[in-house]
Image (cartoon, rainbow, N blue to C red):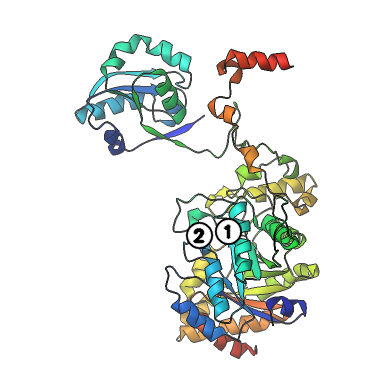
Amino acid sequence: MSLKSILESHQFAVTAEIGPAKGTDIMEIVEVAELLHGRITAANATDQQSSQMRMGSMATCHILADHGIEPIMQMTCRDRNRIALQSDLLSAWALGIKNVLALTGDLPALGDHPQAMPVFDLDSVQLLSVIGRLNEGFDMAGTALKGKPDFFAGAAVNPGSNTEASQDQQLFKMEKKIKAGAKFFQTQAVYEPAKFAAFMKKAGSFGVPVLVGIIPLKSAGMARFLNKSIAGVFVPEDMIQKMSTAKDKTQTSLEITVGLIKELKDMCQGVHIMAMGWEKKIPQILDAVGLK
Amino acid sequence: MLLSKQKSFEEILGYLQGENKVFLLGCDGCAQASGTGGPVQIAEMKAKLEAAGKTVTGTEVVGFLCEKALIKSKLNAKVKAIMEADSVLVMTCGVGIQASAASIAKVCHPACDTINLGGSRGEWQGSERCMECGECVLESTGGICPLTACSKGLLSGQCGGASHGKCEISPDMDCGWELIYHRLKSLNQLDKLKKLAPPKDRNKGLPKADMRATSRWAIENPAQKVQKEVAAK
């Protein structure tokens, strides 16, 4: 069943994030795809995540599809103007890619090519509108397309903003994204179920499926890094302590991850696992949670 | 004001390769304020170049090197020293370097890089900046420009990178959309954040062909064109 039909029929979706290769070696992606085949609803291929230059999302999506995984193409506004974005969307559809996650993108200054020109000709909300327009058969200039796509578009939301202004704005922006055509949301990583519940109380009222973001903690150091460097992510101190005193860090990490998913999954309509190199452990996590 | 920063001495020496005699030109407007091309830096550069084996045929600091008429009148007394030099080293912003190159029949080397201040500012300079986008959006953002106040220039609101009201690019930089939120809230206009912002017409933000050359068209453009425009009215 496709991501679209699962979400539209109010079933629970499991998505995983897959980072494209730095280079042309696609062996690992193929291995992960084969391992996750039949276990997840769809997989996101990131678009130069954290502004680190890698293989493209479109090519990775195509490889995933070839190996039986339904792809979600992440598309940021960081590197392409409206001509390139629209063109890539048409290309992606021609290659059989049906899901797009529209993102603004990180600043190039934070990545491995800080000298690059940031584009941001459009932003995430405007990109969603453009996808909707292409779906209707027109480009941004209003010219009719010969053959039109039918993308299932999604967007991101950050439930863990740390000021009242940010929290309000995330909800305002979520509403705008829905107005602009977002049919599902994937969230930034969540470690505080109570805070997520409060977020969902408001976000749930929009009636658009939300897939909660999960990043397994590999170490206490990684947790501190997330707290320090990733906006909107907060790992509570007791979780960090648990990781730093763990004898078997992998085991403890998986226990924490499974516990979080169990606690969060009834608050929303899916889980989005960003395993960051631990993609092969996803089946094990899903088994322990009791998903499929 | 245009903020400049001196290039490394190695880079400057590279420009002067194969040349022995150089004339130094500074500016006691912005370049002096930037600490890059005022009288003090000119004297320092003279000493460094001489230590590196170059001959400095003369120096001059012009009050506002961006004004071509001033350059010409001020340099009249130094014509001999300039003509004697192989080249002129201009220790100012890019405008001063270009105005010098347009006024002096010698190679003019840049000694400075000009720093981007994130948009134009008024003659009385505060923190507000204008991107000259040609399509003002301040009506919907409480009078704070998202193009200049947000490091991504976003029109649809705050991104996920804001933390504690600061931009992900630096803990010293306020998130522009956090400022816009508070301004709109104080004006009781938070509903404006729910409105979709159309994509910008970026073409309007590009300079028109005749504006690339000048902003003082009435003074610098051919008289014919001015007369034509006046006659048309």
Circle 2 Cα neighbour tier, 10 Å, few/some/many (<14 / 14–19 / ≥20): many
Out of A250 and B228, give the one closest to the viewer: B228
The residue lying at 55 percent from left, 24 percent from top is: B214
Name the spot of residue B202 as percent of width and height, x first. Answer: 63, 43
Out of A96 and B55, give the one closest to the viewer: A96
Residue B28 found in image quarter:
top left
What type is the residue that disc 1 sits on?
Answer: Gly
Q: Chain of mark 1?
A: A
Q: Which residue is mark 1?
A: A105
What secondary structure is marked by label 2?
Answer: helix
The residue lying at 59 percent from left, 80 percent from top is: A69
Name the spot of residue A6 as percent of width and height, x first. Answer: 72, 80
| Whether label 2 touches label 1, CB < 8 Å | yes
What secondary structure is marked by label 1?
Answer: loop
Against B107, residue A249 (above or below) is below
Against A229, residue B150 (above or below) is above
Residue A150 found in image quarter:
bottom right
Q: Residue furthest top?
A: B77
Q: Which residue is mark 2?
A: A51
Horizontal placement of B207 versus A265: left or right? left
Residue at mark 2 to residue at mark 1: CA–CA distance: 8 Å
Mark toward the start of the polypeptide (2 vs 1)? 2
Quadrant of image for the N terminus of chain A? bottom right
Q: Is residue A268 visible?
A: no
